[in-house]
Amino acid sequence: MLRAVERYLSGRGDPSVRLLVPGTAELSRRPLLDFRIERRFEVRRGGVRQRVPGKKLKQISRKRETYTDLDTHPVDVPAGFAPSPTVILVLAGSIAEVPCADCKGGKQGCGLCAGRGTRDCAQKVNCTGCGGGTAACLSCGGSRTAYGPRNRQPSRTASGPRVQCARCGSHNAACPKCAGRQTMDCPDCDGKGLRPCDSCGGRKNVRHEECEGTGFFTTWTEAHITHPVAADRERDPAPAYLWWPTHRTGGWREAPLKDVTDKLPADLDESHRALVQPHLARKQREVRRRVTLRHLPLARVAVNASPKWVYFAFPERPEAGAGLKVVRRPARQQVVRFAATASAAVVIVVLVVWLTVKAIG
């Protein structure tokens, strides 16, 4: 990597630099890592009681695969690592059609009328013609005692036909619907005080909704087998100022790890090995895994003769030449100096603008 930096400097017009000479440069290794492991597990849960309305033994039997021993029942592990549907099994011999315990033949007593078929009803209601008020009779107001036919005559301003009041006897004074009585027989019960139940219509029984009026339930025991996926990741990414070159041209080394017995690559950095190693052990109920391990050797080179810059070297992709790529970045002190200069410039500009505005004002 030091020779690669030498060639880079030579290409920029400085062929005299020899970085292999002790004391001319400082090299530190900063490898990058991108590790991800995805696991698919298998979870089996039995003893799930199910119940549906009606006689559906044949339907359930056709739709569901049966099992006898859940732990040994064979189930295909879904390919890939996308979400997968739940496998539903039925315990052999558990399907049964049982009568509904809460009804008789799909019917049960009406809860609104307590099985009577009728509901109490008011025998009399306010007259719908006069509203049950004083307009019931223009002479006595429907009260019989407040006014009398001898001391008050019907109002000549009354509109519409009127009849003789049944209470005070005045002619052409009372509401034609109640004849001055202010009330009338309830139209729902014809004044009987009982009317058919709104819920059962007088039948005393209603449809049992829980069993959908069938009077039966189909019951069974089923098991659910799921294959959830979980992922772990460890990363040692490039800093922001190196992300683009390492991502675009970096010759990342990939290591296929299909099983727990596969060994980590020999050139993997020890610090990265310590990060990855704990994730490789097989976990309980794990049935499939996919491991992606990518690492990129990266070196930072500080040249004593060029303190303003630091150089980074890393392998290139084969299509880019499969050599060593070198990129140059400003040293920390240069960045700090530039930031201080920029900040000072901003302060000066703000101050000038403020003084100008103040002078104009």
Image: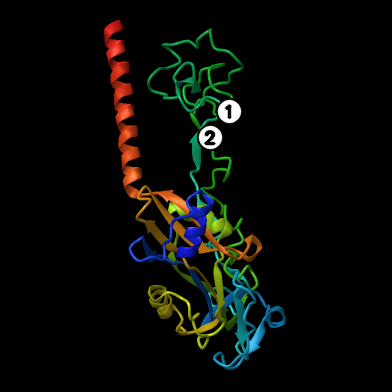
Q: Residue at x 27, y 14 (%)?
A: 355
| Residue nearest the observer in this picture, 358 or 64 | 358
Left or right of residue 94, residue 4 in this image: left
Q: Which amino acid, by three-letter code, is at mark 2?
A: Met
| Residue nearest the observer in this picture, 281 or 263 | 263
C-alpha span from label 1 to label 2: 8 Å
Above or below: residue 237 compared with residue 92: above
- Quarter-wise, where is residue 161 in the image? top right
Secondary element under disc 2, as helix, strand or loop, is strand
Secondary element under disc 1, as helix, strand or loop, is loop
Give the labeled residue for mark 1: 177
Q: Which mark is residue 110?
A: none
Give residue 292's position: percent from left, percent from top.
54, 72
Give the labeled residue for mark 2: 184
Name the N-terminal-most of marks 1 and 2. Answer: 1
Give residue 346's position: percent from left, percent from top.
33, 28
